[in-house]
Image (tube, rainbow, N blue to C red):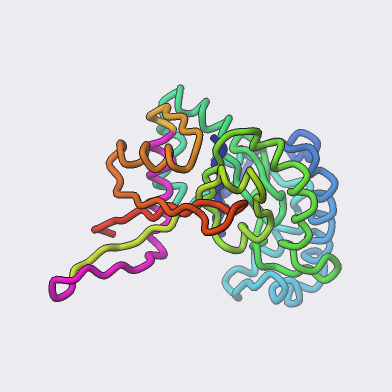
Amino acid sequence: MLVLLPPSEGKATVSRGAALDLAALSLPGLTAARATVLEELVELCSGDTEKARGVLGLSEGLRGEVARNAELRTAPTRPAGEIYTGVLYDALDLASLSAVAKRRAVRSLLVFSALWGAVGIKDRVPAYRCSGGVKLPGLGALAAHWREPLAGVMPVAAGDGLVLDLRSSAYAAMWKPNGALAERTATVRVLHSTFVDGREKRTVVSHFNKATKGRIVRALLESGAAPRTPEELAGTLRGLGHTVEAEAPAKPGRPWQLDVIVTQV
């Protein structure tokens, strides 16, 4: 099973570590595309700070992120699983996984990124600021930049197994599975169930959507479950205590949708 995760906007502070080595990252078919984004991002952030802030959509309080981006080539690195922080990663809590679950995580987790395309959790990267919706002056929309390179490497990375796609929309736009691979792909929507005047009401949750997804991934890694299809995944999640409704695609060549119903957020 391959699990696709979104990155976090905030990153852990890195004070020491080896500098970035693009050639050492997973999915080497993305190296050239990574180098192109890195070069333009560093160039942008080495120039006019106000222009860079505008392009990256950063507030005045995040002005320091521009200077940090300018130093990406020489900045210290840490494993991506330690760099990304936030609600999903707090709930996943990679550091506290059992040894066996950590090995599963290394094999099965990929984090999508506007700068790197996608990286494994052991890949060493520096902290950076560049979201999935950014349009760089030379390259344009980064989601579009990544579509062709990712289309070349992701089917190989997925193999013939299940893909659990937990990416947010900005990162899902970078690569969409198709054909038979899409039919082995499951996306997850988290719905909050409440009762109003005796009638159930379901609403899409936002912030706690990330926490639920983190807990789901953690439970799957610790359980050692190896579902091969979206239907098997739904059954596995039910066995792990989740309320899940599975919806087959309306047309061939599209992903399944799993609705995870929660009563508390």
Q: Position of residue 21 (x, y in %)?
A: 78, 38
**Which x, y percent locates residue 115?**
72, 54
The answer to which of 126 and 1 lies nearer the viewer is 1
Q: Is residue 142 visible?
A: yes
Q: Which residues are magenta?
A: 196-220
Percent x, y of residue 51: 76, 76
Q: Residue at x 44, y 32 (%)?
A: 221
Q: Is residue 211 left or right of residue 23?
A: left
Residue at 73% across, 38% down: 27
**200 versus 1 height, above or below:** below
Q: Nearer the viewer, residue 153 or 131?
A: 153
Query: Which of the two residues, 203 or 85, is positioned nearer the viewer here?
Result: 203
Indicate yes or no whether the magenta region holds residue 67.
Answer: no
**Viewport quadrant of the C terminus:** bottom left
Is 52 left, or right, of 250 in this rendering?
Answer: right
Q: Residue furthest left?
A: 198
Would residue 212 be counted in the magenta stretch?
Answer: yes
The image quadrant where one finds the N terminus is top right
The residue at the point 37 percent across, 65 percent down is: 205
Q: Within the image, what quadrant is residue 108 found in?
A: top right
Image location of residue 20, percent across then percent down: 75, 41
**Farthest residue toward the front?**
251
